[in-house]
Image (spheres, coloured by chain):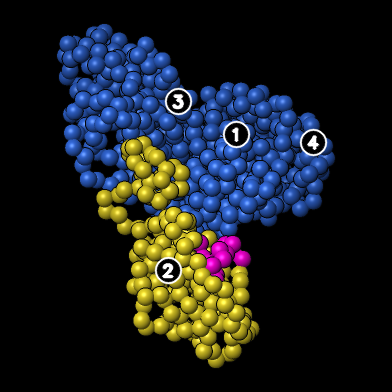
């Protein structure tokens, strides 16, 4: 297999670097990202293999020549790129005798040439709908799901692959994965759905992933949509293991919770692991529009299987990662490669990271982290592409009067609201009702200031509810969580396009 | 460490929004002036005596609002709803009656502090979840729970005291 990444840029070298320069560059970066100095740094572990591989290529005359020849050939046919733009919350930080926080906003943008050039849809979708048909779905919910599925079938075009799995205590494949050729026949199968039984997500999910696997392909957006209205019991670990396997194969999962009685932590996790999104649909009537919009966005991809690897320097700590756009979603800090799903042609991916800087820092420029984004661009052959960025900041003796850029300020202001409800829930979980109600009151004040009167009322109502019952209502808990998350999506849409 | 000026919470250097209360911390070009938190023990001493004027507010009536230490009264003809608060360039919502000229910021008035609603022939006042609370004749109002306003009532928004008369 051809070596895909550019060993020069990975080591930060120009094409005419000497052997000595290669050695120096390798040693410098090894000091930062070697696993031995980074015991709890999955990003560095993931990136270091690439770094070593690049070093080996450049130190071996034959391999180096082979790479150079191939790279020249590649340059002559025009390939599309995506770019990585990173904005720090401060360009310079003051050396302090205490820990401090720095934010990085990473934005991944599709190639502008692509949008100017061809308007032809490049990506096809390989979609499995995994639908809950447990007893609680009976009535309006199931009816609306059927309508939504019919509309999705209408939306699909030639080359798309589609399957439908329904599940309660067991799973049933009601439409086998395949091209969508006879739409009326497919719709008829959907209309036959009836509700009964309990909710066992693992069975449905594994059947759905199995259907997607049959057509797994580089030219396809491989995606599973799980729609449920209930708790699954005892099979959650199995589900997340399954999701991890799926993510490795480039399958993303979006998890939609309908009504109040589903496990939000669990669905969030499924989505975060695979680069999909999770959402709360509070009424059956919203299902149709939600699913249609979701599927429409899938079929507008520039590149797929986007992954972000974050390797902070040994003395820097990554504290949190949050995807702001396209679908706001908290992400895990424990993955070497964080799945981001697909990059759409008309919307950027943006991710906000929070780092803690160490106490003692020497003055001058220093690196804080290396970010690597990789993914498969549909229009390219070969598809694989990678962009990397080494982030450096200046450490100064005196504080520099500078505010964070407005893009970060805006995102942080709203992310803070999400964190506040999160911390209120954490306080409740640890039994501190007083703290929880106070946090909710603060949240209400902030929401009101942002013109979110209705949500502010809910926060206040939940504060009272918590004071009386030591808990949040199921509905209020989900509303606060997903609505504060949604505020981030709104700010993002204003920001671009 | 940065101590939040609004709730006293302690945040690490570099944190932009207080992790406790969500208020923005120490921007250099600070654009939004948040409501100051006032120690409740200070405001308790400002409490007033109860009065019992008429609750009837006729069709052609207007409100005379006397703000303490301000010589000229404000005359208001409330429509269905009248919000009281403090204007702020960057806030999305503006109050109908802006109390900024009467020292609203120093006195801990929120941007949207309270509202007066007009029903058929009475007025009600409701606290909009303000930071320092709304007091009617010395009693703190529960946010979102309207109370009837009477002629001669004392209304206190944070530390800003006003008397309301009907005409």
Q: Is residue B143 magenta?
A: yes
Report the residue marked by disc 1. Answer: A430
Element class at badge 1: loop
Subunit under mark 2: B
Q: From which residue to which does the magenta span run?
A: B133-145
Q: CA distance from mark 1 to mark 2?
A: 39 Å
Q: CA distance from mark 1 to mark 4?
A: 31 Å
Subunit under mark 3: A
Report the residue marked by disc 2. Answer: B160
Asked whether the residues under marks 1 and 3 belong to the same chain, the reply is: yes
**Magenta span: helix, strand or loop, mainly?**
loop
Element class at badge 4: loop
Q: Residue at x 26, y 25 (%)?
A: A360
Report the residue marked by disc 4. Answer: A198
Between circles 1 and 3, the one closer to the viewer is: 1
Between circles 1 and 4, the one closer to the viewer is: 1
- Chain B shade in the render: yellow
Q: Is residue A80 visible?
A: no
Chain represented in blue: A
Q: Quarter-wise, where is residue B147 in the image?
A: bottom right
Element class at badge 3: loop
Q: CA distance from mark 2 to mark 4?
A: 59 Å
Where's residue B84, x and y in %?
Answer: 46, 71
């Amino acid at each position: 297999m051809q070596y895909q990444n550019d060993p020069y840029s990975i080591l930060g070298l120009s094409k005419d670097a000497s052997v000595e320069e290669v050695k120096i560059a390798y040693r410098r970066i090894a000091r930062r990202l070697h696993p031995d100095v980074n015991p709890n740094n999955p990003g560095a572990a993931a990136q270091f293999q690439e770094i070593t591989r690049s070093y080996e290529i450049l130190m071996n005359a034959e391999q180096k020549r082979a790479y150079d020849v191939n790279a020249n050939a590649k340059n002559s046919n025009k390939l599309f790129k995506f770019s990585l733009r990173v904005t720090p919350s401060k360009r310079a930080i003051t050396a302090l005798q205490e820990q401090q926080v720095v934010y990085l906003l990473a934005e991944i943008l599709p190639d502008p040439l692509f949008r100017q050039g061809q308007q032809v849809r490049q990506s096809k979708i390989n979609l499995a709908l995994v639908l809950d048909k447990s007893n609680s779905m009976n009535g309006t919910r199931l009816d609306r799901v059927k309508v939504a599925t019919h509309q999705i079938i209408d939306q699909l075009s030639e080359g798309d692959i589609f399957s439908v799995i329904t599940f309660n205590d067991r799973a049933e494949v009601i439409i086998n994965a395949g091209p969508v050729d006879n739409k009326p026949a497919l719709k008829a199968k959907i209309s036959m759905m009836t509700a009964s039984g309990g909710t066992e997500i693992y069975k449905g999910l594994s059947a759905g992933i199995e259907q997607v696997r049959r057509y797994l392909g580089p030219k396809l957006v491989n995606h599973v949509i799980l729609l449920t209205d209930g708790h699954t019991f005892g099979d959650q670990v199995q589900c997340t293991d399954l999701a991890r396997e799926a993510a490795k194969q480039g399958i993303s999962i979006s998890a939609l919770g309908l009504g109040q009685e589903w496990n939000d932590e669990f669905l969030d996790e499924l989505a975060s692991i695979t680069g999909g999104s999770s959402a709360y649909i509070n009424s059956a009537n919203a299902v149709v529009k939600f699913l249609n919009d979701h599927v429409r966005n899938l079929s507008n991809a520039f590149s797929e299987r986007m992954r972000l690897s974050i390797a902070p320097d040994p003395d820097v700590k990554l504290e949190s990662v949050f995807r702001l756009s396209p679908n706001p979603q908290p992400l895990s800090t424990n993955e070497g490669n964080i799945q981001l799903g697909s990059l759409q042609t008309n919307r950027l991916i943006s991710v906000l990271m929070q780092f803690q800087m160490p106490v003692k820092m020497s003055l001058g420029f220093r690196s804080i982290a290396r970010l690597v984004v990789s993914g498969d661009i549909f229009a390219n052959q070969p598809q694989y592409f990678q962009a990397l960025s080494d982030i450096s900041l200046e450490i100064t003796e005196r504080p520099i009067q500078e505010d964070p850029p407005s893009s970060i300020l805006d995102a942080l202001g709203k992310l803070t609201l999400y964190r506040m409800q999160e911390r209120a829930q954490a306080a409740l979980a640890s039994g501190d009702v007083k703290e929880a109600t106070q946090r909710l009151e603060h949240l209400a004040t902030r929401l009101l200031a942002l013109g979110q009167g209705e949500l502010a009322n809910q926060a206040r109502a939940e504060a009272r509810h918590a004071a009386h019952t030591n808990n949040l209502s199921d509905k209020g808990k989900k509303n606060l969580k997903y609505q504060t998350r949604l505020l981030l999506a709104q700010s993002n849409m204003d920001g671009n396009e | 460490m940065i101590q939040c000026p609004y709730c006293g919470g302690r945040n690490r250097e570099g944190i932009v929004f207080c992790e406790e209360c969500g208020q923005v911390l120490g921007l250099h070009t600070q654009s939004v002036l948040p409501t100051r938190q006032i120690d409740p023990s200070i405001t308790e001493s400002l409490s007033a005596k109860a009065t019992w004027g008429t609750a009837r507010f006729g069709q052609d009536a207007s409100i005379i609002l006397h703000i303490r230490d301000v010589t000229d009264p404000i005359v208001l003809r409330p429509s269905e709803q009248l919000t009281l608060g403090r204007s702020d360039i960057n806030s999305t919502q503006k109050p109908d009656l802006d109390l900024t000229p009467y020292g609203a910021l120093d006195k801990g008035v929120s941007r949207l502090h309270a509202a007066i609603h007009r029903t058929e022939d009475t007025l009600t006042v409701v606290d909009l979840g303000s930071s320092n609370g709304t007091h009617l004749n010395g009693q703190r109002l529960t946010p979102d729970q309207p109370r009837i306003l009477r002629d001669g009532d004392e209304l206190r928004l944070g530390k800003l005291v006003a008397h309301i008369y009907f005409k």
